[in-house]
Amino acid sequence: MNDKLLLELYSPTGNIANYVQALWFARAQFSGESWLPCDGAQGVIFLISGQLNLAGKPLSLTYFMQTISTQSEKVTFTAGSIFCGIRFKPAGLAHLKKVNHFLVASTTLTGIAQALNQHANLDSFIDLLSAHFNVPEVHHHTIEHTQTLIHKIINLTPLTTAYDDSPKGKRQLERYVKNTCGITAKHLARIYRVRQAKKLIKESPQLSLAQLALECGFADQSHLNNEFNVILQITPAKYKKLIHQ
């Protein structure tokens, strides 16, 4: 996140990787703030010690279930704060709930929160969750078709192509995505187009914003500016200056 925060990440493998992006563990060396990137997904945060505010609201529960990310959100923390979490893939939490997966049961999450008070590090966090990662996957055709469509959107496949490649009808898929992601497929595609622009700003600073807009499929530079600012809470010009100063 930034130099005030020590952040460790772990990407799970196996069936659970269809639903979970990563586990993360953070320790704040100093008081500070950072921005959580927008990804159209949800997460669970466990606050172990210190004080943590998300979008201006203090977190004080045993665990906190994040809402669907449609904009970047500011997180502030006090020195010495320790917190960690599970970051799901878009629709991942809804899909796990649909098949009653133990990982997202309230008793499981409460137990994890209590255990973290005794052993607060990434390895312990992974150990607490690993037993639930190995639970056999329950196949569900609706979920599988929705996951395939979402995967194509994340990989920037044009929506019309993504729909045409599915055995399900467009309206069915639109309904599935809205019900599980909480946002439309079109909205999810907007988020990942902006994420692509953010990635290219970082990797290819020589590109002008007009070139960037064309490269990422925006109508023009003004369209890029508006979408980037709405979703990431910063203009592309300010972001470019921030990371390349």
Image (cartoon, grey):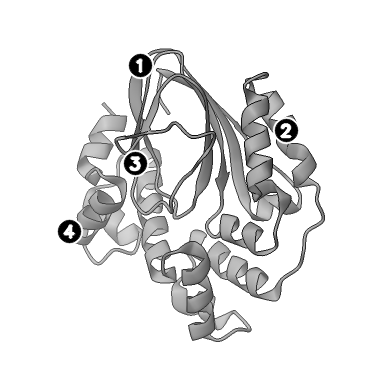
For the point 36% across and 62% down, the residue is 190
The answer to which image quadrant residue 159 occupies is: bottom left
Q: Would you say 169 lies left or right of 219 here?
A: right
Label 3: state its secondary structure. strand
Please provide percent x and percent y for residue 96. 65, 57
Looking at the picture, which amino acid does disc 1 mark? Answer: Ser
For the point 40% across and 42% down, the residue is 37
Residue 31's label in the rendered image is: 1
- Distance of label 3 from label 4 (alpha carbons): 23 Å
Q: Which residue is mark 4?
A: 222
Please provide percent x and percent y for residue 102. 72, 50
The answer to which image quadrant residue 130 occupies is: top right
Q: Nearer the viewer, mark 3 or mark 2?
A: 2
Label 1: state its secondary structure. loop
Whether pointer 2 and pointer 1 mark residues with C-beta atoms closer than 8 Å, the reply is no
- Distance of label 4 from label 2 (alpha carbons): 47 Å
Looking at the picture, which amino acid does disc 3 mark? Answer: Glu
- Distance of label 1 from label 4 (alpha carbons): 36 Å
- Distance of label 3 from label 1 (alpha carbons): 17 Å
Residue 73's label in the rendered image is: 3
Is 177 in front, or is 64?
64
Whether pointer 3 and pointer 2 mark residues with C-beta atoms closer than 8 Å, the reply is no
| Tag count | 4
Please provide percent x and percent y for residue 148. 61, 68
